[in-house]
Image (cartoon, rainbow, N blue to C red):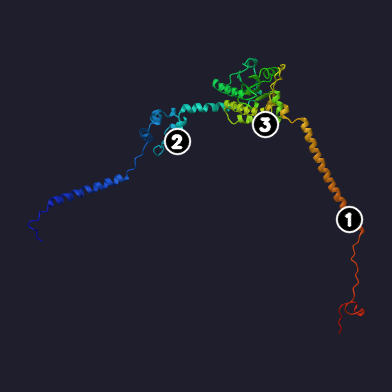
Amino acid sequence: MSRHPYDPPVPSALVLTMGLLLAVFHPLATAQDLEDADLTLPEWDASEWRQQAIEAAPPLAGGLLPSLGEAAAAPATVNDELQLRFQDAPPQFDIEALSAQLSDGRAIPWFAAVDDAPAAASATQSEPALAIELRDLTPEAVETILQWPKNDPLVDPTAELSEMEADELRRFLGYHATQARLPLRAIVTGKNHQLKDPAALTAITSAETNQLGGKPAALLIYPMGEPWRARLFLPPTALHAVSQPFLREAVEDCVAAARRTTRVESQLHDYLVQLSVRLFWIEKHLPPVVQSASPEPIEIAPPLAEVGSGDERPATVTFVPWNFLVTQWRTALAWVIGLLAAAGILMWAISVRRRSRARHLRTHVWMLPEVDSTPRLGGAFSGGAGFQTSW
């Protein structure tokens, strides 16, 4: 085959050079690919994840809270909920949950400490005091109660309430006094305090001492943290206007309302609110007030009568009256005697009936009557039979 005169010459030297380079560098490229395939994936350290999370995390609450860099730098001084957790994946931030926590302050450490402090204190104060731990009110406290302003519905001789809580309860009791015929006066004592001295109790519960707005008031002696030991005193008119079971139920409802919460200040508030409602119920049973034109002689009002609860409740409220027991016992005995008499009469009637029947069977014999029948076929030779056979 001959080459055309106008075809360009083939660069044989260039072809040989390219083939030589391919033969030299091809084994090197194949070895490099095999080496890259055998390499392991990079292993990330927790410190690297921490640094990446710090750089990528947005500022909390617009920069009001400590940044995540500070939280990661000093994790021992930050709340556990704000510490970063590093596993085998980058951290995930729940923006909705964090926003909900920021809205009520639960993500801020100092708000959590303030919120948990009353609960811890109430847990220790809500435990019942032992009998050996109870202490009588000191003479100074009793004197403070007697010298307390007469128009103040809240008496706190040992400063058990804060000023804000005391003012709130005073406003509530004052409003109750303006709307009710039976105002309410509360004496707040310590958890382990009790009032056992008869002379001091008589002086404190006298009608002259418990007057609010010219009206006889109900008196409540309330030990903080122990609503079941509260003692309620009512004027005789209110005490005799309703039944003892009604008063006992009222006291039990007040105690139940107070025990729904563990905070001692809230227990006192709930107790007073429930007692205020019950006093309004008692007012419906009071006799109407009669306005007299002629002045009447002033008489000394009798002292208040107690309607206590728990260990302080009087026997007339705790136990059933004796006359009631006698009446119920007589009724039950009459029913028992009547049932026994009816059962005895029934058994006697059955026995008489059985004896009469046995006697009747022994003296009487039952026989069927003999009926004469006329033979229809044959005569005497057939013995009166109705058929005969012959061979």
Q: Is residue 352 visible?
A: yes
Q: Nearer the viewer, mark 1 or mark 3?
A: 3
Query: Who's the residue at 17% across and 49% down the image?
Result: 18
Within 10 Å of disc 2 (Cα), the crowding (few <14, some 14-19, many 20+) is few
Q: Which amino acid, mark 1?
A: Ala
Q: In the picture provided, is 43 more to the left or to the right than 387?
A: left
Instruction: Say if 350 sits above or below 316 in the image.
Output: below
Q: Secondary structure at mark 1?
A: helix
Instruction: Say if 173 sits above or below 352 in the image.
Output: above
User: Residue 343: percent from the left, percent from the top?
Assistant: 82, 46
- Of marks 2 and 1, which one's residue comes earlier in the chain? 2
Q: In the rendered image, which residue does mark 3 sit on?
A: 249
Q: Which amino acid, mark 3?
A: Glu
User: Residue 78: percent from the left, percent from the top?
Assistant: 44, 29
- Of marks 2 and 3, which one's residue comes earlier in the chain? 2
User: Residue 350: percent from the left, percent from the top?
Assistant: 85, 50
Q: Secondary structure at mark 3?
A: helix
